Image: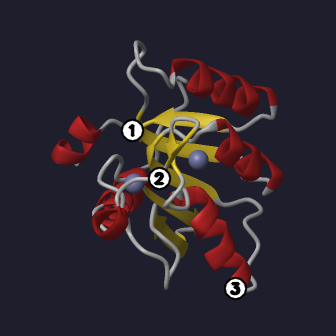
Amino acid sequence: MNETSLPRDAVFMKQAEAESRRATCPRAHVGFLLERHGKLLIRSSNQSPEGLPTCKEAGHLMVDGHCARVTHSERGGFVKLALKRLSPQGATAYTTWFPCVDCMNLIILGKIKRLVFASMADPNSNYRREFHIAKRFALRAGVKLIHFPKEKLLRA
Ligand SMILES: [Zn+2]
Ligand SMILES: [Zn+2]
């Protein structure tokens, strides 16, 4: 993960960070966005689908260590993109939290070749194995991983 960051990474990561504040599950606030040639395609956060109760209203709904009440920001983002009839191919993905395996698979399927992320799971957490696999899949598929820590944003 020694890929170099670009000047626009700070701009888009700042927007992903802002988007993460719109998340509806207090367990995790994740912001995700897709950008291509400097143009923002979509932004998304982990939220309950419109019309369904939020975690605040109905409590978390834990399934296999994830809250099933919300759609992961990446998945929600891909649906938004489809509704706009746009392709993710060749876009750069920005996320405030390193993707889970399922979302990483979507990123790979979408032919996204560059992923900028702010944080990763604590190496001692239950998600350690999940993140390790996601990282391995990304590297195997040729997705460039750029770590852009929050602290770097404060300086940008
Ligand atoms: Zn929740
Ligand atoms: Zn996910």
Give the labeled residue for mark 3. 83
Q: Is residue 89 left or right of residue 50?
A: right
Q: Is residue 30 above or below residue 133?
A: below
Is the CB–ligand 1 distance for label 2 below 8 Å?
Answer: yes
**Residue 54 % position (x, y):** 38, 69
Label 2, label 1: how many angstroms apart (C-alpha)?
Answer: 31 Å
Residue found at the far top of this picture: 124
How many other residues sit within 10 Å of disc 3, few (<14), some (14-19) or many (≥20)? few
Q: Is residue 88 above or below residue 85?
A: above
Give the labeled residue for mark 1. 148
Is the CB–ligand 2 distance for label 1 below 8 Å?
Answer: no
Q: Secondary structure at mark 2?
A: loop
Residue 61, label in figure: 2
Label 1, label 3: how many angstroms apart (C-alpha)?
Answer: 29 Å
Q: Secondary structure at mark 3?
A: helix
Sequence-wise first label, 1 or 3:
3
Nearer mark to the viewer, of 2 and 3: 2
Q: Is residue 140 left or right of residue 8?
A: right
For image coordinates 50% across by 53% down, the residue present is: 94
Label 2, label 3: how many angstroms apart (C-alpha)?
Answer: 27 Å
Q: Mark 2: which amino acid?
A: Leu
Sequence-wise first label, 2 or 3:
2
Q: Is residue 1 above or below residue 153?
A: above
**Residue 30 % position (x, y):** 40, 53
**Residue 151 % position (x, y):** 22, 36
Sequence-wise first label, 2 or 1:
2
Q: Mark 3: which amino acid?
A: Leu
For image coordinates 42% across by 74% down, the residue present is: 53
Q: Mark 1: which amino acid?
A: Phe
Q: Is residue 89 above or below residue 67?
A: below
Q: Secondary structure at mark 1?
A: loop
